């Protein structure tokens, strides 16, 4: 499996988890929402970790592009982490309005971020990096 396919499937899984968590919040099913949100957050952070610790350094080394797309992606991960923290707090306070509104901001950020990765960064990675080896190293960090 190539890098693009492997990481794009993780994007889809995380999207699905968020949709389920959002539905639970909308229905004020708080215990279920907490469980689903935790899974969404853990998997999203694991996905970020795979990119930050394996993919981005390898991309920078092989392409020599150090201040390019990987820096933009790292910055967007940092923004997403802040929104994840705000969502967690909204959930603790059972604040449905806040959760849904911050969640919408996060989804807009993530959809734009994922599109850039899927259309530019991942295809460039498959072209320039040893795909199988990179996927293997990312898999060792865990399963999304
Ligand atoms: Fe990313
Ligand atoms: Fe990604």
Image (cartoon, grey):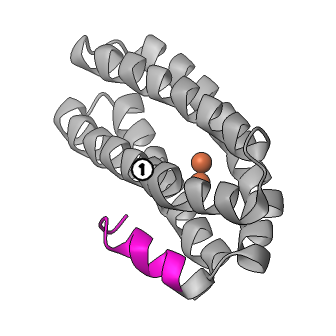
Which of the pair 136/57 is nearer the observer?
A: 57
Looking at the picture, how far across and down is residue 64, in whole percent?
77, 55
| Left or right: residue 74 compared with residue 70 | left
Vertical position of residue 47 compared to residue 131: above or below: above
Would you call the spot at circle 1 few (<14 residues within 10 Å), some (14-19), or many (20 or more)? some
136 within the magenta span: yes
Quarter occupied by residue 118: bottom right
- The residue closer to the viewer here, 4 or 15, is 4
8 falls in the magenta region: no
Residue at 72% in and 35% down: 72
- Residue 80 location (% of width, % of height): 53, 30
> Which residue is rendered at x = 25% and y = 10% of the image?
93
- Left or right for 122, reference 141: right
The local secondary structure at tag 1 comes to helix
Q: Residue furthest left?
A: 31
Tell me which segment is drawn in magenta.
133-144
């Amino acid at each position: 499996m190539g890098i693009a396919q492997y990481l794009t499937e993780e994007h889809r899984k995380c999207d699905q988890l968020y949709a389920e968590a959002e539905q639970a919040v909308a229905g004020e099913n708080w215990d279920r929402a907490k469980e689903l949100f935790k899974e969404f957050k853990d998997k999203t952070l694991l996905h970020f970790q795979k990119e930050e610790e394996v993919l981005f350094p390898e991309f920078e080394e092989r392409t020599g592009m150090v201040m390019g797309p990987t820096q933009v992606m790292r910055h967007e991960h940092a923004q997403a982490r802040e929104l994840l923290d705000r969502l967690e707090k909204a959930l603790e306070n059972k604040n449905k309005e806040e959760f849904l509104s911050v969640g919408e901001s996060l989804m807009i950020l993530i959809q734009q971020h994922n599109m850039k990765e899927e259309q530019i960064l991942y295809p460039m990675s498959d072209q320039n990096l040893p795909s199988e080896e990179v996927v293997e190293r990312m898999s060792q960090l865990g399963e999304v």
